[in-house]
């Protein structure tokens, strides 16, 4: 059993970031190093397959971290989630159970599990409070991924009840930023829009066609803000309830597309393919609990989009096709 007292974590203790090269994990590593942590470790997917239970146990045994952030996951946009639900359910469950079981076995003192706002019911009252979990049906296009993330939340809660470990969960809203997945088939909406409009400008296209009607509303949080919230929660929060992390404001997908067009310099027309699914009509998180603890997002969408597009331009030759 661990007795947690809110306050700064020991910067000299080992901190394992599972998924340290991904969008979220790399941001957490940057934030930890900025905060003075001197022993941050991680392993790439080629070095450690988190679906391999024995390998995960060997890694955690060898490294014996005091702190752990579980940011590794199989993720994708609406098309990928809808097309490969078995993969999203099975692989995420394997990753979570393996890492959480190994962390429990070797006594990781402080752990944060990261999920997604898709855990909440499709028609949950807006903005969505933490209490909405498990109160209604999920959005069908990503229900498999959502179920896996819900299982992770419940495992963290179970460990707290059974072992008394000071583990917590956080549920970020839609994320964007450097190191995102910009692939045409596997990306989320915002990086997909960035790539689509960029290629339209590059190719001199007069129009861009996006999925759906453009009417669903989405909230976007810069991944560096999330990383800051992760460290804040680890040092200031200890409770069984998952904590929403977001900005508390949303915009329609068509408004987001206009922003991306402006950032990329696209001046043509935008069309909408209404034969494609929209997904959840609105997904805005109630972040009042996190704000009551003393944390609030700082990166506005305008500057965040601009810096993300700059990163995309600098790294596009190495991006997934």
Image (cartoon, helix red, strand yellow):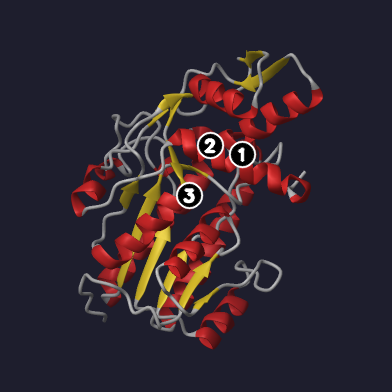
Counting labels gives 3
**Does residue 192 appear anywhere in the picture?**
yes
Q: Which residue is mark 3?
A: 223
Q: Which residue is mark 2?
A: 305
Horizontal side of residue 215 vs 267, given as left or right? left
From the image, which quarter does the N terminus lie in?
A: bottom left
Q: Position of residue 239 (x, y in %)?
A: 23, 62
Identified at 38% across, 64% down, the residue is: 112
Q: Are marks 1 and 2 in contact (CB under 8 Å)?
A: yes
State the CA–CA distance, disc 1 to disc 2.
6 Å
What is the crowding at mark 2: few (fewer than 14 residues within 10 Å), some, or many (at least 20)? many
State the CA–CA distance, disc 1 to disc 3.
14 Å
Horizontal side of residue 171 vs 276, given as left or right? left
Relative to 256, residue 48 above or below: below
Relative to 232, residue 7 above or below: below
Horizontal side of residue 3 vs 157, given as left or right? left
Identified at 32% across, 44% down, the residue is: 133
Label placed on residue 10:
none
Identified at 53% across, 67% down, the residue is: 18
Q: Answer with the quarter of the image where residue 264 lies.
A: top right
State the CA–CA distance, disc 2 to disc 3.
11 Å
Q: Which residue is mark 1?
A: 309
144 and 110: which one is in front? Answer: 110
Mark 2 or mark 3: name the one nearer the start of the chain: 3
Q: Position of residue 302 (x, y in %)?
A: 47, 33
């Amino acid at each position: 059993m661990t007795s947690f007292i809110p306050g700064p974590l020991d910067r000299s203790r080992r901190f394992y970031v599972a998924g340290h090269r991904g969008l979220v994990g790399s941001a957490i590593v940057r934030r930890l190093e900025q905060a003075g942590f001197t022993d941050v470790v991680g392993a790439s997917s080629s070095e450690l397959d988190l679906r391999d239970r024995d390998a995960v146990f060997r890694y955690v045994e060898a490294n014996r971290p005091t702190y752990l952030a579980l940011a590794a996951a199989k993720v994708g946009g609406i098309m990928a989630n809808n097309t490969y639900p078995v993969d999203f359910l099975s692989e995420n469950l394997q990753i979570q159970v393996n890492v959480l079981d190994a962390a429990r076995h070797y006594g990781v003192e402080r752990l944060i599990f990261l999920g997604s706002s898709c855990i909440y019911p499709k028609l949950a009252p807006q903005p969505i409070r933490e209490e909405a979990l498990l109160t209604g049906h999920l959005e069908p296009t990503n229900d498999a991924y959502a179920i896996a993330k819900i299982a992770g939340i419940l495992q963290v809660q179970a460990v707290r009840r059974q072992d008394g470990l000071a583990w917590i969960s956080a549920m970020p809203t839609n994320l964007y930023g450097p190191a995102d997945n910009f692939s045409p088939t596997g990306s989320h909406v915002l990086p997909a829009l960035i790539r689509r409009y960029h290629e339209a400008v590059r190719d001199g296209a007069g129009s861009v066609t996006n999925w759906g009607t453009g009417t669903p509303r989405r909230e976007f949080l810069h991944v560096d803000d999330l990383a800051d919230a992760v460290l804040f929660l680890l040092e200031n929060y200890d409770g069984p309830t998952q904590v929403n992390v977001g900005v508390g404001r949303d915009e329609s997908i068509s408004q987001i597309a206009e922003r991306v067009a402006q950032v990329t310099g696209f001046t043509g027309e935008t069309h909408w393919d209404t034969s494609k699914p929209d997904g959840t009509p609105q997904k805005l998180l109630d972040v009042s609990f996190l704000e009551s603890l003393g944390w609030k997002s700082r990166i506005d969408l305008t500057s965040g989009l601009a810096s993300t597009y700059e990163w995309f331009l600098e790294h596009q030759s190495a991006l997934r096709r």
